[in-house]
Image: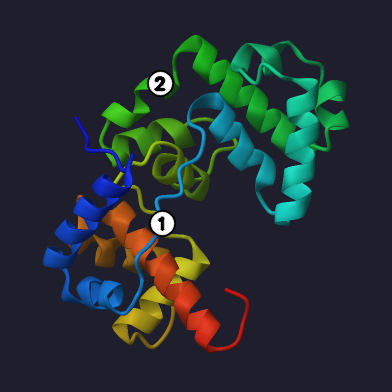
């Protein structure tokens, strides 16, 4: 059974373990990169919310989600599967996002995506089940695992902010490419998710020092 990051105490324990694995992570946390827990709704609703907000501003994503939730109070796979494309598009969803939500709903209903049991699986296995659904990419899968389930070893290696934070923290010449970043992150197993949270916190600190919005 995986120890989930489902409380501040669990996150603190993970951070302590991570600090023992990597002195750079230990230094970042001592310098103030101590991330908040930041939990989101799990299950179909949480995954649908991530899909809805992709490539949109926070304000736009919030507005679309509010309309979607108003039209579908029972935000579950059956509700989406039963809705017409017109109803879903009326909330502001793109055609691609409608297709992805329908694919997710179908995968949950036919059992190929056991969404209620993903927290029990190793991160790589859960990631594979998510990305097997058409429309769910690696970044989406990892964000769901990390923020909705609190999986301690989920790691969105393609995230540009994480790559830039790693460049700064480790004195790299440039942002690591995804393949290289995955290799670098091996040192953090089974706490790669905690490392991601620390790196995001470090990135916000670095940008604040530069005078940019955190």
Q: Is residue 119 visible?
A: yes
Which residue, given by chain and number where applicable, does mark 2 sit on? 116
Q: Nearer the viewer, mark 1 or mark 2?
A: 1
Disc 2 is placed on an element classified as helix
Query: Can you say which quadrant of the picture contains the C terminus?
Result: bottom right
Per the model, the C-alpha gap separating discs 1 and 2 is 24 Å
Label 1 or label 2, whichever comes before in sequence order? 1
Q: Position of residue 59 (x, y in %)?
A: 76, 53
**109 in relation to 207, above or below:** above
Drawn side of residue 82 relative to residue 203, left or right: right
Quadrant of the rendered structure where residue 87 is?
A: top right
> Residue placed at 45% from the left, 43% from the top?
39
Drawn side of residue 155 relative to residue 27, left or right: right
Which residue, given by chain and number where applicable, does mark 1 sit on? 36
> Residue placed at 43% from the left, 83% from the top?
174
Q: Residue furthest front?
A: 9
Drawn side of residue 20 relative to residue 210, left or right: left
Query: Can you say which quadrant of the picture contains the N terminus?
Result: top left
**122 in relation to 28, above or below:** above
Q: Nearer the viewer, residue 188 or 28?
A: 28
Q: Position of residue 205 (x, y in %)?
A: 46, 78
**147 in relation to 175, above or below:** above
Q: Position of residue 194 (x, y in %)?
A: 30, 56
Crowding at dot 2, Cα within 10 Å, few <14 / some 14-19 / many 20+, comes out as few
Crowding at dot 1, Cα within 10 Å, few <14 / some 14-19 / many 20+, comes out as few
Q: Is residue 114 visible?
A: no
Q: Position of residue 116 (x, y in %)?
A: 40, 21
Disc 1 is placed on an element classified as loop
């Amino acid at each position: 059974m995986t120890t989930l990051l489902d409380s501040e105490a669990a996150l603190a324990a993970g951070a302590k373990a991570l600090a023992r694995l990597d002195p750079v992570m230990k230094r970042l946390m001592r310098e103030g990169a101590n991330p908040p827990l930041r939990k989101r709704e799990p299950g179909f609703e949480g995954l649908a919310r991530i899909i809805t907000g992709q490539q949109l501003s926070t304000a736009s994503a919030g507005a679309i989600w509010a309309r979607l939730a108003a039209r579908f109070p029972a935000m579950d796979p059956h509700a989406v599967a039963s809705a017409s494309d017109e109803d879903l598009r009326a909330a502001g969803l793109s055609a691609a996002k409608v297709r992805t939500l329908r694919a997710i709903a179908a995968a949950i209903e036919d059992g190929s995506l056991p969404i209620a049991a993903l927290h029990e699986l190793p991160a790589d296995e859960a990631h594979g089940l998510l990305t097997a659904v058409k429309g769910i990419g690696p970044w989406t899968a990892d964000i769901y695992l990390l923020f909705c389930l609190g999986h301690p070893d989920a790691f969105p290696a393609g995230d540009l902010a994480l790559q830039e934070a790693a460049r700064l923290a480790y004195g790299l010449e440039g942002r690591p490419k995804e393949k290289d970043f995955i290799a670098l992150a091996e040192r953090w197993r089974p706490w790669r998710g905690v490392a991601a949270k620390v790196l995001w916190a470090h990135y916000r600190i670095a940008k604040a020092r530069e005078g940019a919005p955190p």
